[in-house]
Image (spheres, grey):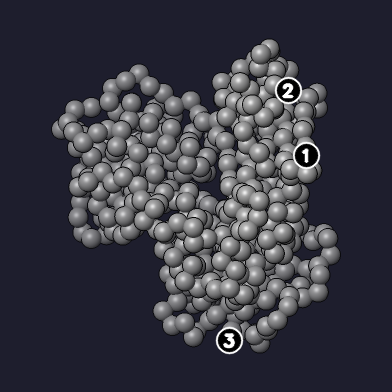
Amino acid sequence: MTSEQRVVVIGGGLAGLRLAARLGPGAAVTVLGEETHAPYNRVLLAEVLAGRYAPEVTALPAPGPALRRGVRAVRIDRADRAVHCDDGSVERYDTLVLATGSNPVLPPLRGLFAPDGRELPEGVHAFRTMDDCLALAAAVRPGLRVVVIGGGLLGVSATRALAARGAQVVLAQQAERLMERQLDADASSLLRDHLTALGVEIHTECRVRGLTTTGADTPMRGASSPPRPSSVPRGSAPDPAPQTPARLKDPGTRRVTGVELADGYRLDADVVVLACGVRPRVGLAQAAGLEVRKGVVVDGRLRTGDPRVHAIGDCAEHDGRVYGLAGPALEQADALAAVLRGHDAEYTGTRALTRLTLPTAGGPGPFDLASFGDPTPLPGDDVLRLADATRRTYRKVVLRGDRLVGGVLLGELSTVGALARTWEGDESLTAPHDPFHLLTDDGGH
């Protein structure tokens, strides 16, 4: 890559800005950022919602004039090597990088949209962008009844943040346990205990059927319906198109009043938070004729089927996998920067570690958790657990032969660095790196 080669990056998030930074100030890079906010670290949005961080604390270094804020790419002309934007401008490229990220999944709930529109009722919020975060923070006050739909990483983060603001939070999770993709049953139970101690009401194996709104039913207030049975039929309908709708212009038109469950029970709600996961934003790639499966399909050099077009971050699918996490997005940006600079580099995948800190207001300290790999053992695997009920710590690793294949830690993470390095390096667990040593408080040193 020479300084004259024009690189256009669609997306001003972590991946796009990291790529621009790695290419350096001498490169001819233009980053198209759809949001008008200064670039920010999306990972920290829950801390903003909780009131622990001001929005400016989440700021990312911006690549100076290379970033065009508030500009949305609407069409890619691959034949002409041009990106058409919503303000009428056209950015021509020698290399195009799609870093379009992902949209929140909006579940197919009855009452979510009016028959004649795609506008959310007042009080219903997605939780994906800084605008989402600020709108939700402005809507929540102590004592307000909030229902969070989704008990994965995003839903748990939002739940903790809302509880920290004094809201009465109810968490509805379709799966049988919280954060089922990252945690085993024991760890999830400890997490549930932690959230319950914060005053959160939790319903698992609970499918949400719809929303009730003013104008569609008689508003109800007060306590929720009687306690639900412990088991509710599971299942879900296909997700709608991944597009975040506009807010209602007239607050009096429709407002959420409750959440209906598939078993007929109803939860009163002043505010509903949709934390049902994310879906890669692939509309531009599809319209441009690029191969899309779950995400935009790329090879080891992060190339699409068009060698001039690359994809990184939440929108990219590499080796059949879409990560949707910050760590892989940064690694992909670094790998692509090396490729564009002419190095013999290749992205081979990321062994991603999930880490979450849940501060405890007035408590003994934060409740930390981390998970990596697959914490669910297969037949023939060995499992090592260390638990301390008094200190509320839990550590579990799964061994396959002499290799570490997954683990979960809660409460005390002093050993997570050594365990993660051993797992990422696919190292043999022989002395002095035996699993008992790695699980001790000294972090394996």
The span from disc 1 to disc 3 (Cα, nearest Å) is 52 Å
The amino acid beneath tag 1 is Asp
Residue, disc 3: 215
- Tell me if 12 is positioned left or right of 322 in this view: left
**Which quadrant does the C terminus fall into?**
top right
Residue, disc 2: 436
- Tell me if 423 is positioned left or right of 90 in this view: right
Q: In the rendered image, is residue 290 in sight?
A: no
The amino acid beneath tag 3 is Gly
Q: Residue at x 36, y 56 (%)?
A: 56
The span from disc 1 to disc 2 (Cα, nearest Å) is 15 Å
- Pinpoint residue 80: horizontal percent, then vertical percent: 22, 43
- Pinpoint residue 390: horizontal percent, then vertical percent: 78, 44
Residue, disc 1: 388
Disc 1: CA contacts within 10 A as few (<14), some (14-19) or many (>=20): few
Q: Residue at x 61, y 58 (%)?
A: 361
Which one is closest to the eye, mark 1 or mark 3? 1
